[in-house]
Structures are given as C-alpha cells and as structure tokens.
Image (cartoon, rainbow, N blue to C red):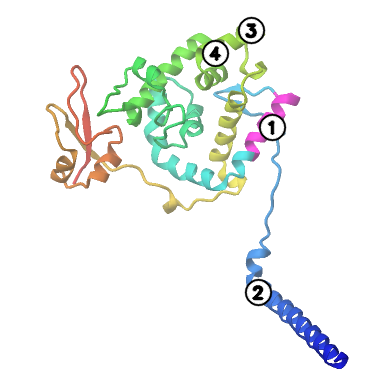
Amino acid sequence: MNQIKKWQIFGLFTVFTLAIILLAAWSTTEKAALSPYFDLPQQIKSIKLSRDFTFAGEKIPINDDTKERLDRELLVNAYWQSTTMLHLKLANKYFPQIKPILEEYNIPEDFLYLAVAESSLRNATSSASAKGFWQFMKPSATEMGLIINEEIDERYNLEKSTRAACKYLLQLKNRFSSWSNVAGAYNMGPTAFANAMAKQKESSYFDLSISEETSRYVFRIVAIKEIMRHPEDFGYYVEEDHHYTGLPEFTYHVIEKPILSLADFAHEQGLTYRLLKYYNPWLISDKVNPVPGTELKIRVPKK
C-alpha cells in the first residue's frame, strides 16, 4: 500500500512539473509573439514651463499656485489622446466658420479655444441643460436673441450662436475689464464672479479662490490652445486627409410657411432625414413653423 502511495505522489509530482514547463514555454512563445505590443517605447514626459504663456494677449502670471494650475491642465490635455485628436480634426472643419465671426466682433482669436473647452466643438448638452458649441443656458441664449421653442433651438445653429456668444463676451468685457476675467465669468456666471471679486477684494481671475471648475478654466483654455497650435510638439500628428472637411456649399430655403413634415421636405431636396438634421441641427422637431419677425433658413447642399 505504501508503495502505491509513493507511485501516486511521484505521478502527481511529474504531472505538476510538466505543467509548469509547458506553461513557461507557452508564456515565452506568447510573449515573443506579442512583444511588439508589450515593448512599445512609450515615453511620458513632463512639460516645460520655462516661457511665457498668454490668454488673449494677457500674460499668465506665474507663481507657486498658478504654475501648478497651468502644469496640471497641460498634462491632462496633452495625455488625453483621443479627445485631443478629435479636437484637432474638428477644428479643421469648424474654426474657419467661427474665426471670421470673432474677428467681426473684435473678439480675440484665443476664444476659439473657449468653444473647444466648453463643448469639444460639438453640439453638446450639459447636465445643467446648457447646449451647443458655446454651452448657452436658455435664459442667456434668449437674452442674446436666440430662438428656442418646441421646434427650434438656435443654440445648435453655429453661426447664430457664435454671434450671440460674441455679444455676450463683449458685455462681460465691459463689466470685467480683462479677457481672463471675461472667461472666468463666462464659466462661473457674471453675478457669482462679481460677488467673488467683491467679497475677496480682488480684481484678477488669477487671484480669486473660487470653485475648482472655474479655477481650472482659463488654464484649461490656454493648455488646449498650446496643444492645438503646436500639436507636433506634444506628439500629435494628423495627416492632411485625416482632418474632418468643411461643410459643402449650400442653398438656403427660407421658411415662409409651415413645413409639416421635415422628412418629406428632406426627400424633396434629395436628402435623407438624417442628413437634413446633420446640416441643420437647430431643427429639433419633425416639423417647423415660421417665427414672426425672424428669417429662418434651412441649409441644403448644392447639387
């Protein structure tokens, strides 16, 4: 009986040893096959801050506090790869539409990147129901002349919402003097921002102790600007034909009478319903009626 137990133990030991040998061999083989993936020469580098950074022509003051705030946003956005790559692709499509309107209103070009920070250049909707590229809340949007009803939401109209944003930014500039204060007030809300300035007896965004979101906001815009203006310096390369292209040339159909079916209208124009909404995201219903005193125009690509 003892002899049988010895052979059983020996057999188990042999099987266990062979299993270890086979597992080691398999692991070596698999690792060799996958080595191009495991052995990538990944480099995670910190970012040099040994130069001046500006927002809308205003120099960012550098001290112990602001240096860390700027460094944080540069690192977060530099290594936020998929989002940053999409920003670069979308900018090729939308910046040419936004930039001339900013110039028309004498708004600094850096506010292109405020739109990126707000919405990632998409018609986004926030948890607080702010909407569009410029993330307008409904009261501010209607105050700036945008139409919002059950069929239309012009916060999703890039041209009109950009013009509304410019008017709003100019109001903030008249009230808060510096462009960095304007950006802070845009994010925080002008009343809350003014109250913080008065309570803390400070006149600069950079010296205010405010919510983390707003405290990071201008630094985030500056970081996005630096990366998008110098993408290769941060390791981003986009082939020319990989950029998202601009929109086609359009004809414009003025809404003079009710359109009871946008699906029928789309098909009459040789479009799918989806493409009609893609080119006119401000049409939020399946029908649309004229708005007295306002010219509403539907974009349709030229054939």
Q: Is residue 252 magenta?
A: no
Q: Which residue is mark 2?
A: 30
Residue 93 percent coordinates (x, y) = 39, 41
| Frontmost residue, 33 versus 24 | 24
Residue 99 image offset from top left, x and y in percent: 41, 30
What amino acid is at disc 1?
A: Arg
* Disc 4 residue type (three-letter): Ala
Marks 2 and 1, the one that precedes in the sequence: 2
- The span from disc 2 to disc 3 (Cα, nearest Å) is 64 Å
Element type where label 3 sits in the image? helix
Sooner in the amino-acid sequence: mark 2 or mark 3: 2
The magenta segment is: 62-75
CA gap between label 3 and label 4 equals 10 Å
Kind of element beneath mark 2: helix
Q: Residue at x 57, y 25 (%)?
A: 55
Q: Which residue is mark 3?
A: 199
| First in residue order: circle 1 vs circle 3 | 1
Q: Give the side of residue 244 with respect to residue 152, left or right.
A: right
| Amino acid under disc 2 | Glu
- Seen in the picture, residue 171 relative to 252 is either above or below; the reply is above
Camera-side residue: 137 or 8?
Answer: 8
Dot 1 or dot 4: first in sequence order is 1
Say which residue appears at 50% left-offset and 9% top-offset: 175
The relative height of residue 131 versus residue 79 in the rendered view (above or below) is above
Residue at x 57% of width, y 41% of height: 230
Percent across and percent down for residue 30 are: 65, 74
Q: Secondary structure at mark 4?
A: helix
